[in-house]
Amino acid sequence: MSYAYLQCIEESCRLRQDPKRDAYHCVACGGLLEVKYDFDPFDPEELRETWHRRRLSGEPIDRSGVWRFRELIPFVDPATRIISLSEGSTPLVGTRRAGYWAGPVHLTIKHQGNNPTGSFKDLGMTACITRASSRNVRMVACASTGNTSSSMAAYAARAGIKALLFVPYRQISAAKLAQALDFGAIVVEVGDTFDQAFRLLREIAPELGLYLVNSVNPFRIEGQKTIVAEMMEQRAWRPPDYIVVPGGNLGNASAVGKGLQELLELGFIEKIPRVVVVQAAGANPFYQMISSGLPDLIPVEDPNTQATAIRIGRPANWKKARRVLEWTGGLSESVTDEEIFEAKRVLAEDGVGCEPASAATIAGVRKLCRAGKIERHADVVAVLTGNQLKDTDYIMRHRSASEENRQRWCVEPNLDALRRALDQALGVPV
Ligand SMILES: *Cc1c(COP(=O)(O)O)cnc(C)c1O
Ligand SMILES: [Zn+2]
């Protein structure tokens, strides 16, 4: 059987630690931990066939887009109860206008909004809550910009574990808050930013014996990394040139990179795509570090963007994410809220809806293309991280009646008024 252990990511330390410990940081140096494996030898070809076959199986564990690839995440023993809501198995769709607008590049969308709670967080959560459940944890907690909390609340409910979440006061979208409440979580609104809520949670967690499911929890990353196995399978194991993700706490970028690195080492792919991390201009400490070649990340104290899912000034996983850019020859870019809106509008013209944070990816590709850092006609996969309905307030703010954008009409209920309105709305006499 494959064997899993935890290891410190710091080059100068790399201490292996007890996989039975529920820790997020190295006992020796405080560095981040990652899950490592001594994999059983296997034949990639055989395993690809097994994974493919499982898609037709009726077993919940085979239908999950995470657990279908369980040989890549062998940290639970076979007797463990898997907490799954049939996450993953999300579509990979082509674009027309968006790819032309952003490049032109050959742009496909991996839409993680098609997950049970509407974001990619479900991939990590099934892994992390399965781990928590196998350790008989009674209460899980996280700080969140919204989607982690919806996801945690759902999977905790499924596992019969209490869920406690900290969110910044009035800073998360109504839909995300509603989901968490619907799944029965206890919600504490505290602080003005995610970073503040997260710091307070970390300080209070030990005395309450809370099991944290933020992306500093290395098992989250394990679930999230399966996105690349699924993506490669959908592409007949031909890696694209670039995989683009938005960057908030940088768990997703870390997971994508770890997944790719392992697929390469295990012989599933022969080249590694360059990972691109796009941040919002008002919350871009990672971009700043990369673009100015700084040795350390300087936090943004007052992060600000309407893309609330990436409104994070002090990303916990920056070291893992930087390693990913080094491994893959990756890039980072920063985009304004206006550029994000524009990208979201172009995606909508292709019939693709998503959260503002997700659209940052396409805006980033366009900028990098203009700068000649991504070649024209490159093969690019953008990960759209969240569902369109996660933030309808944003859409209403940008799309309701105004001089330039008259999409929405309130009409007196009679035919004359209706004709007049439609005449104006459609720009042709009715
Ligand atoms: C969480 C989230 C992000 C940011 O992901 P990180 O792993 O924190 O970088 C981006 N978009 C959406 C929709 C999210 O929910
Ligand atoms: Zn260490």
Image (spheres, grey):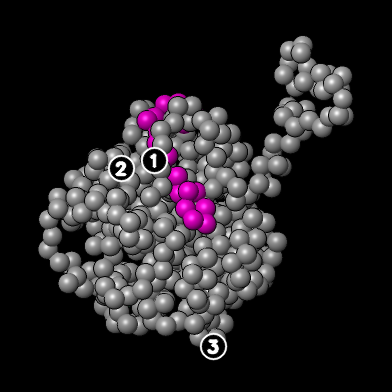
Element at label 1 = strand
Q: Residue at x 32, y 60 (%)?
A: 59
Residue 339, x across and y down, in percent = 57, 37
Residue bearing the label numbered 1: 92
Within the magenta stretch, is there residue 107?
yes
Comparing labels 3 and 2, the label whose residue is closer to the camera: 2
Q: Is residue 285 visible?
A: no
Density class for disc 2 (Cα within 10 Å; few <14, some 14-19, many ≥20) is some
Give whichever of 12, 125 is nearer the camera. 125
CB atoms of marks 3 and 2 within 8 Å: no
Residue 353, x across and y down, in percent = 55, 40
Compared with 164, 100 (above or below) is: above
Residues at marks 3 and 2, CA–CA distance in whole angstroms:
45 Å
Residue 137, x across and y down, in percent = 45, 81
Relative side of 239 to 367, left or right: left
Quadrant of the image containing the C terminus: top right
Q: Is residue 88 visible?
A: yes
Q: What stretch is highlighted in magenta?
A: 100-118
Give whichever of 208, 326 is nearer the camera. 208
Quadrant of the image containing the N terminus: bottom left
Element at label 3 = helix
Comparing labels 3 and 1, the label whose residue is closer to the camera: 1
Q: Which numbered dot is residue 207?
A: 3
Residue bearing the label numbered 2: 234
Density class for disc 1 (Cα within 10 Å; few <14, some 14-19, many ≥20) is some
Relative side of 265 to 144, left or right: left
- Chain-order first, disc 2 or disc 1: 1
Label 1 amino acid?
A: Leu
CB atoms of marks 2 and 1 within 8 Å: yes
- Chain-order first, disc 3 or disc 2: 3
Density class for disc 3 (Cα within 10 Å; few <14, some 14-19, many ≥20) is few
User: Hey, which quadrant is residue 379 in on the image?
Assistant: top left
